[in-house]
Amino acid sequence: MSDLKAPWLQSYGDVKFNLEYSTLSMSGKVFESCERYKDNIALSFMGKNILYKELALRISETAKGYAALGIKEGDRVLICMPNVPQTVYSLYALNYIGAVACMVHPLSAVGEIANYVKDTESNYVLTLDQFYNKLCEVRKTIPYEKLIIASVKDELLPVKRFLFSVTSGRNLPKPHDSDDVITWNTMIEMGRSYTEDPFVKKEADEAAVILFSGGTTGVTKGILLSNLNFNALAAQTVAMCNRTVTGKSMLAAMPMFHGFGLGVCVHTMLADGGKSILVPKFNVKEYAKLLKKERPNYIAGVPTLFEAITRNPYLDGVKLDCLMGVFSGGDSLSVELKKKFDKFLADHGANVRIREGYGTTECVTASCLTPYNKEKEGSIGLPYPDTFYKICKVGTCEEVPYGEEGEICLTGPSIMIGYLNHEKETADTLRFHDDGRRWLHTGDMGIMDDEGFIYFKQRIKRMIITSGYNVYPSQIENIIDSHSAVRMSCVIGIKDEYKMQRIKAFVALKDGFDPSEELKDEIMALCRKNIAKYALPGELEFRETLPQTLVGKVAYTVLEKEEAEKNSCSYPSK
């Protein structure tokens, strides 16, 4: 089952296995592309194209700017930025001088950012002018040495820069240089006067980036990822595409603080001479405009993004025959949504179908993907080249037979170094098996069939136990989501004195549908038809929207907390 010479790996179309991986750093790999593809477009941002030779120059001057500030090998810098060019320059510039980029969501709360600064021991923080006041608030909680302020307008073409300045940019803070604040442009000027080459050679297995777990399964932890992790992911992703991405383009709507956005949408493209189209903020109208204008070859996103696309009126009549690959990850893609989106693609002239993948931030992002030439309903596909899966009995390293459910475990070149400042959690998650390999225990339940296809079932920590039965919420959600009126749903377990946990479903409806007892009865009838009696929701509540995490997943922990507080108020302790 976990045989590292598994037979299906020898007959997977034209995909090459046993790849060769670069020994360069992340920045070294991108500089290699800059030399090889000098006149190709590397980045596109708000209509502005940046060639590879220009990218090399911008990374170099940014590296000198950071070195001039005093940032040195081993330092950690918090990058609190959306998908703008300065984020890309900083990622590779810091890597070039031997520092570590810590990527976080700029819309995080003050307390969250303060914890990120504390956990990573970052003395330098990069953000946009629009988040200046927030980062000043952070400093009151946890002091740091220098705040670097960039501006979107500096990367815009002249006409758009002017329009930005007199519209949305008019009321933005305009910070000045001081002892603890420096503007991006001042830092770059400092770099132009820096005469030394700040390059520090880093080994492939050394830390390059810290990403943070999505926060849906407990305490958010920093995940240490190496140069090899990212370069291996890039090579594997290109192999799974079954063609080079050189000269091709990808819409980078997934944020760079997310492994999917950073690892696939940006680094994979830049490591192979492709074009990454940076999308700083997602909204359906602008996304539709980009699809029409840029005609990207690849798009990637979480299921909620694809659901939004299918309901996007701005895409009516738009031809998508430009697409060579459409990838879904970050959350489970329901069978119903896959069918709906495949039809959407076909109706818009695309010759591809959506390919569901699976991964965790602990291996950067994807490590498994539906093949380009074969799919199985409900499957997340086959492992990436040189990545191997096994299904183990929960809590053990003992492999279960084909078709039997257990914990998804994997090993390969994209496996993290470990959790930052969490040695016990690292030891629990990364375990050496009898084969001598280090395996990542994902905390997810799944099945492997006799052809090696993997089926994601449920996060172990999200299992509901009611009246002694194990219930997996995603299975109920898939049934509810199949109703024509349902946009999304979330199922949680609520503490119950008799059953231990009772099951409650939250439902958000599509536009044009209103909550009613009749509709609730329809949904419950659908559940009764497809779900065992013990697993039926005892309560169904309609909501206009459901809370989401920063990476677009439904934040079921928020709903659990709300219900726990409600029950605590309703039933005070004696």
Image (cartoon, rainbow, N blue to C red):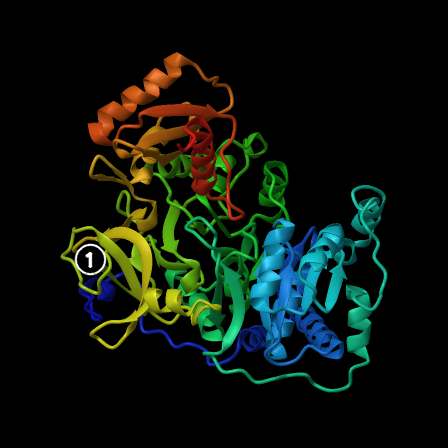
Residue 29 falls in image quadrant: bottom right
Residue drawn at x 34%, y 64% is: 429
Horizontally, residue 258 falls left or right of residue 521, namely right
Residue 53 visible? The answer is: yes
Residue 312 in the image: state x and y as whole percent: 54, 32
- Which quadrant holds the C terminus? top left
Secondary-structure class at tag 1: loop
Q: Is residue 110 left or right of residue 550?
A: right
Residue 246 visible somewhere in the drawing: no
Coordinates of residue 138 in the picture (x, y in percent): 69, 56
- 305 or 538, nearer to the observer: 538
Q: Which residue is mark 1?
A: 393
What residue occupies the far bottom of the structure in this picture? Answer: 196
Q: Position of residue 432 (x, y in %)?
A: 27, 73
Kindly identify the residue that appears in the image at 74 percent across and 64 percent down. 148
Residue flagged by tag 1: what amino acid is it? Answer: Lys
Left or right of 53, for residue 464: left
Q: Position of residue 363 (x, y in %)?
A: 41, 64
Q: Quadrant of residue 378?
A: top left
Indicate left or right for 110 with 424 as reference. Answer: right
Q: Is residue 570 above or below residue 195?
A: above
